[in-house]
Every structure is written in structure tokens, then in C-alpha cells.
Image: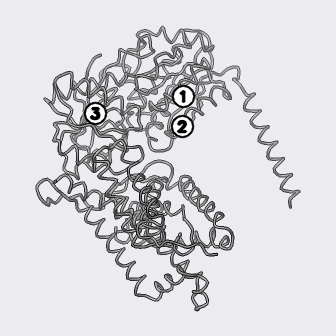
């Protein structure tokens, strides 16, 4: 018995080593360009990852149908980060070292972008993230972004609240363990104060809790005009429900992390949030993307889809102009991106690799759907 | 003042759920001296049983509630039979490590079942939320009242079973001295199975109450409440049933008040209190000081 199990484990070891060597030596086939994608395909923010994956697959299919890039087929390798920065960083490592991808689209949440981007930078592999925290791109020449940042989103929401809704006082609640929610909250607070408003209270909560009543009761006691809680959609659902339960009646405001098919539209009825595009946008590229996506998947794209689509578009455009799959050459071409007609708008990068050219839309949740309210140009 | 009252109401709601979970930890510990780390995951199982039976089989809510309790009770017994009973005669550390294994098995097992899966699910609204004004700005919701009422009723029932029934007497005897209880003709193995069943049923009930109050289900949803309830059980005196109730309630109220005062450090405050209590009363608030047998 003992002998048998030893033989078994040796065989297993040989098989495991063999397969890992095989995958390691696999490399790129002659007619293929491998591009990695990192997104939360499962876990607490799984709808982000699924939307991202669908959009990236859609663009790859469209490009391949037209003969690919540089005469080669685009192959997307999807990695699931489960919404966890550690798994996300490992995924970047794996895509770069084992799969030898030429570029990476994603990760999506800022905290995972923070963890994975230094790996791409030091390996010299261009990466286009879709996280909105401003600190991801500066100082990293290989790291770009396919959406506007939280400075802009916080600013837009504060302006909208002060100028359009006439709010003068605001209460804030955010997840202390979420870089994204923290940065949006801070920028919102600073802009709102600079405009002349006042912040009645800033409350925080740890990640992974489900009870927010203590914080909400505090916010209710300060009776602000607006209540801003830029958490991800799953937390926003619970916070919205409990806010109603404790009797907090302030106008609810959120950010782009709310955009998900799983958002509780009934509970959050009447709330406003910032988004990266509106389905009613008349731009030809936006229209084409929305209808192609709907034709392939039978549902309308959300903003995670459009950001993922543009991320891959930026990569493919750079490979085409660089006429090479070498990391440094793609990077140089990518940095020179100017006026690329993306699905969200025309994309040109600033010195950090952020597109300062994309507009923001304010959406309102009303009667079980989201409607377009207005846009802010940068 | 009104705000303080609101916060205490918030705390009591969380506290009664912690108390229900803490009872499972403390009862099992009282009899087999095992910290059943998989206990928290029974909460998750309870929530999903209710979720699946309501959403997929249109079972009415009270029936789904009872079903969740029954499934979790059976799972508790099964857990003991398969994982803990074979190790009863071995050093306690073995069973403790096994408990962690059972916990991981339940979490990842649930994660890989196609009808549960890794993504979050939203528990249906079983009854529409209603606010009742107590005084001024102090309100309670029907969900809070329901949760507290059910939890208190279950705890009262448990007290009755333990104090006034033969099963309860056997459980108390087995927890005081299993060997002497066996000599008196008590089937200790059956008593242990009953304890796991009751603990599991309470965890199942807590799972449904949690799902009603916080309608977000995931395979890992039992970890944090399980951990906090465990701490509450230690705080109240592990092995002591009134201790678990008091511990859970105090834990809920203190946590809520600390969050209300300064939300950034709230999670730590309770642990500071726990350490203080354990320094002065190592057996916990209501625990019996134990003397190591020579």
C-alpha cells in the first residue's frame, strides 16, 4: 500500500511537471497575438468581470473576422481575479511569465489595478486598466487607462449636487478597504466644500460587513441634503435598503461602481450616479458598440463592457501602429494615441497614460431602469 | 439621547443573531470540548436552503424557515458522525483541525455547486419593510421586530428544553461529567448528536434571520458572523448557555455603539473589551472557572 502510494505520487509529480513545462514552452504560435485579460469573473463583483469578458471577446471576434491585426489572429486569455488583489497580481504574473502575452487589458477594480500594475511595469508589458483611482498610472510608463479617473467623477458628482440639485450639505459613507470608494469620496468632499457646500459627516465601514445601521443613524441625525455612498453595487444595495429602514431620506448619490445588472433598482429608486456613457449617446461608435453587443449577447452593455472594449481597442490600435508585438514598441505607439475613436469618446492620453478627453454622464434610477440626465465634458 | 436609543435598537438586532450563533458554539463546547469552526458555515447553508426553496420551489416563508432549521440540524449531526466522532478518543487538537477542514469543505463545496456558485445572490423580500415610530426620530422596522422576536422565542424554547426536559437533563449531566453520565445509563453519544442537532438548527435559524435583514448571500457569508459569535461565546464564558446569550447581545450593542462613535476603529473595540474581561475573569463573564484534573 505504502509502495503503491509512493509510486502514485511520483507519477503525479512527473505528470504535473510535464504539463507545466509544456505550457511554459508553448509560447506564441506563429499566426497568433496573445493578449491577457484580468477580471473578476466570479465573486462579489462578478458582473463587472462578465461584462468585461463579453465586450473583449466581442471586439476580438470583430477584428479577427476582418483578418486580425498584422495578419495575425487575436487570442484572448482570460484570468479570473475573483475580486481579490492577491489573485489579480498572481494572474498578471502568470499571463506575463507563462503565457507570454504581449499586453494585458484589466484589471477592473482600482485595488486590483494597484496590485497588478507594478508587475506589468517591471516586466515591460503594456497594460490598460479600467480602474478609476488616479494613483494607478503615474510613474508607470507601461500602464494606461481606458476611462476617466475619480478626480473627474468626484468633481462631476459634487458639481451636479451643488449646482443642479441645489444641495448645500452632504453626508458620506464609504468602504475603508476600497481604494476606489475612498478616493471618490475624498474628491467629492473637497470639491463640494470648495463650491461652498459643507460635509455634515464622513462615516466609513470595514470591507465584508453587512450592517451599516450605526453609520446610517449617525448620518440621519445630521440631516444632509444629499447622501453620497460610492461603494460597489453589492454594498450599495444593502446600504440603500438600510438607509430607507433607518429613515434617512436625503437624496442618494452614487458613482460608477453602481453600474451593474445586479443593482437593486427598486430600493435605490430616485438615486443619481456617474457613468462613463449613456445608451442614448448619438455618437456613431457608441451606437455601433451598443447594437453589436446587444445582437451578440441579447442584453444592453453596461459601463464595464464599454471600458473593456475601449481597453482592447487601445491595445490593438497601438500594435497596428507599432507594426510589432514587442512590449516597448507597443508602449511607445500607445503613448502616442491621439483621437482614437473609442466607444466612449475620442481617446488621447496625457503624460500619465490617462485619457483626459472622455465625458461623464449622470444617470438617474427611475421606475426600474436608468435614464440619462446630463453629461459633463472634461 | 434619541440617537443613542436608535443605536441600541440597531445593536440589539445584531446582538440577538450573534447570540443564536454563539449558542451553537457554546453547547458543543460544553459537551465535547470542541470549538466547532464549521458552525459559522451552517449559517450560510441555512440561508441558501431558505433562498433556494423560496426562489425555486415557491415554498412559503415559514416553511422555508423550518426547512432551513431541519437541514442545518441534520447537517450538524452528519458533521459530528463523519468528522468528529471518529476522533473523539484522540487529542482535542485533532478535532479542532478537522473542524477547520469541515469549514473549508462547506465553503468551497458551496462555491462549486452550480445552484449556489461563487457570485453573490440577493435574498427575496419576504415581507415589505415597514417603519414604526417609537418616539421622535426613533424608529423600528418590522424586520427588526421579527428578528428579535424569533431569536428570543428560540432562546426561551432552548432554556425550557435544557432546564425542564429529560433530554436537557441528560445534556447537562453529560457536560458536567461524561463518564459519570454514562455510568448513570445516559447514552452520551446520542446526547452529543442531539447537541449538534440543536446547535445546527439554531445556526440555520440565524442564517435565515441574517438573510432577511441583510439580503446578500455568498458561500463565505458565515465566516464573519461566525467569528464574531465565537468571540461573543468566549466573552460570555464558553460552555455557559446564558453566557452565550448575554455575550452575543453585549457584542452586538458594543459593536454598534463603537461604530457610531468612531467607525474607523469599531472592529477593534470589542476585542479590547474581550481582552479586559479575560484578564480579570479568564473563564468569561458567566463561565465556570475550571480546575485541571490531576
Q: Earlier in the sequence, mark 1 or mark 2?
A: 2
Q: Chain of mark 1?
A: A
Q: Chain of mark 3?
A: A
Residue located 27% across and 23% down the image: A155
Would residue A199 appear left or right of B29 to someone viewing this image?
left
Compared with B199, A213 (above or below) is above
Compared with B118, B32 (above or below) is below
Comparing B223 with A109, the one in front is: B223
Asked if the residues shown at circle 1 and circle 3 are in contact, with their CB atoms under 8 angstroms apart, the answer is no
Please tell me whether mark 1 sits on a helix, a strand or a loop: helix
Image quadrant holding the C terminus of chain B, namely bottom right
Compared with A149, A40 (above or below) is below
Let me know if marks 1 and 2 both belong to one chain.
yes
Distance, label 1 to label 3, CA atoms, is: 28 Å
Residue located 34% across and 26% down the image: A276
Let me know if marks 1 and 3 both belong to one chain.
yes
Decide if residue A151 is in sight here.
Answer: yes
Q: Which residue is mark 2?
A: A81
Q: Earlier in the sequence, mark 1 or mark 3?
A: 1
Asked if the residues shown at circle 1 and circle 2 are in contact, with their CB atoms under 8 angstroms apart, the answer is yes
The image quarter in which residue A272 lies: top left
Q: Which residue is mark 3?
A: A273
Tag in front: 1 or 3:
1
Would residue B276 appear left or right of A29 to someone viewing this image?
left
Mark number displayed over residue B161? none
Please tell me whether mark 3 sits on a helix, a strand or a loop: strand
Residue pushed farthest right? A3
Q: Which residue is mark 1?
A: A116
Amino acid at each position: 500500500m505504502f509502495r503503491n502510494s509512493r509510486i502514485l505520487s511520483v507519477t503525479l509529480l512527473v505528470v504535473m511537471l510535464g504539463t507545466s513545462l509544456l505550457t511554459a514552452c508553448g509560447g506564441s504560435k506563429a499566426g497568433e497575438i496573445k493578449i491577457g485579460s484580468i477580471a473578476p469573473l466570479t465573486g462579489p463583483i462578478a458582473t463587472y468581470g462578465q461584462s468585461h469578458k463579453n465586450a473583449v471577446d466581442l471586439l476580438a471576434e470583430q477584428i479577427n473576422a476582418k483578418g486580425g491585426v498584422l495578419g495575425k489572429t487575436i487570442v484572448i486569455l482570460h484570468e479570473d481575479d475573483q475580486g481579490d488583489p492577491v489573485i489579480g497580481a498572481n494572474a498578471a504574473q502568470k499571463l506575463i511569465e507563462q503565457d507570454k502575452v504581449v499586453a494585458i487589458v484589466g484589471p477592473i477594480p482600482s485595488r486590483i489595478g494597484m496590485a497588478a500594475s507594478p508587475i506589468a511595469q517591471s516586466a515591460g508589458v503594456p497594460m490598460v486598466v479600467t480602474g478609476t483611482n488616479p494613483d494607478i498610472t503615474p510613474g508607470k510608463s507601461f500602464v494606461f487607462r481606458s476611462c476617466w479617473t475619480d478626480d473627474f467623477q468626484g468633481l462631476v458628482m459634487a458639481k451636479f449636487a451643488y449646482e443642479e440639485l441645489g444641495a448645500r450639505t452632504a453626508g458620506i459613507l464609504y468602504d475603508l478597504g476600497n481604494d476606489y470608494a475612498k478616493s471618490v469620496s475624498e474628491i467629492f468632499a473637497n470639491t463640494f466644500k470648495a463650491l461652498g457646500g459643507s460635509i455634515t459627516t464622513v462615516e466609513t465601514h470595514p470591507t465584508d460587513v453587512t450592517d451599516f445601521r450605526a453609520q446610517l443613524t449617525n448620518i440621519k441625525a445630521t440631516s444632509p441634503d444629499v447622501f453620497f455612498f460610492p461603494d460597489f453595487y453589492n454594498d450599495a444595495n444593502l446600504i440603500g435598503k438600510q438607509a430607507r429602514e433607518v429613515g434617512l431620506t436625503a437624496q442618494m448619490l452614487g458613482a460608477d461602481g453602481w453600474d451593474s445588472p445586479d443593482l437593486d433598482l427598486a430600493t435605490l429608486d430616485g438615486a443619481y450616479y456617474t457613468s462613463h456613457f449613456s445608451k442614448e449617446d448619438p455618437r456613431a461608435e457608441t451606437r455601433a458598440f451598443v447594437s453589436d453587443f446587444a445582437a451578440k449577447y441579447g442584453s444592453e452593455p453596461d459601463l464595464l463592457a464599454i471600458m473593456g472594449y475601449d481597453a482592447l481597442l487601445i491595445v490593438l490600435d497601438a500594435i497596428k501602429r507599432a507594426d510589432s508585438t514587442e512590449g516597448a514598441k507597443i508602449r511607445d505607439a500607445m503613448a502616442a494615441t491621439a483621437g482614437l475613436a473609442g466607444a466612449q469618446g475620442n481617446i488621447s492620453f496625457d503624460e500619465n497614460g490617462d485619457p483626459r478627453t472622455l465625458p461623464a454622464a449622470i444617470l438617474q434610477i427611475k421606475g426600474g431602469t436608468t435614464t440619462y440626465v446630463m453629461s459633463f465634458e472634461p | 439621547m434619541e440617537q443613542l436609543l436608535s443605536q441600541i435598537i440597531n445593536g440589539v438586532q445584531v446582538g440577538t443573531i450573534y447570540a443564536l450563533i454563539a449558542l451553537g458554539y457554546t453547547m458543543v463546547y460544553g459537551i465535547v470540548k470542541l470549538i466547532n469552526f464549521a458552525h459559522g458555515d451552517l449559517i450560510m447553508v441555512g440561508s441558501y436552503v431558505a433562498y433556494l426553496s423560496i426562489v425555486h420551489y415557491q415554498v412559503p416563508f415559514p416553511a422555508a424557515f423550518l426547512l432551513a432549521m431541519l437541514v442545518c440540524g441534520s447537517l450538524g449531526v452528519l458533521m459530528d458522525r463523519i468528522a468528529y466522532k471518529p476522533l473523539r478518543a484522540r487529542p482535542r487538537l485533532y478535532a479542532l483541525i478537522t473542524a477547520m477542514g469541515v469549514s473549508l469543505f462547506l465553503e468551497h463545496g458551496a462555491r462549486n455547486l452550480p445552484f449556489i456558485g461563487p457570485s453573490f445572490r440577493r435574498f427575496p423580500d419576504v415581507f415589505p419593510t415597514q417603519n414604526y415610530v417609537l418616539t421622535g426620530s426613533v424608529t423600528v422596522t418590522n424586520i427588526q421586530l421579527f428578528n428579535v422576536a424569533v431569536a428570543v422565542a428560540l432562546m426561551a424554547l432552548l432554556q425550557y428544553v435544557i432546564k425542564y426536559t429529560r433530554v436537557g437533563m441528560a445534556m447537562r449531566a453529560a457536560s458536567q461529567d461524561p463518564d459519570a453520565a454514562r455510568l448513570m445509563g445516559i447514552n452520551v453519544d446520542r446526547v452529543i448528536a442531539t447537541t449538534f442537532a440543536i446547535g445546527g438548527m439554531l445556526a440555520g435559524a440565524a442564517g435565515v434571520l441574517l438573510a432577511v435583514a441583510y439580503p446578500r448571500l455568498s458561500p463565505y457569508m458565515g465566516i464573519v458572523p461566525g467569528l464574531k459569535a465565537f468571540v461573543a461565546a468566549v466573552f460570555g464564558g464558553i460552555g455557559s448557555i446564558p453566557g452565550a446569550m448575554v455575550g452575543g447581545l453585549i457584542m452586538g450593542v458594543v459593536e454598534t455603539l463603537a461604530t457610531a462613535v468612531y467607525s474607523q476603529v469599531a472592529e477593534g473595540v470589542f476585542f479590547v473589551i474581550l481582552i479586559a474581561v479575560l484578564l480579570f475573569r479568564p473563564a468569561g463573564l458567566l463561565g465556570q472557572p475550571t480546575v485541571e484534573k490531576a
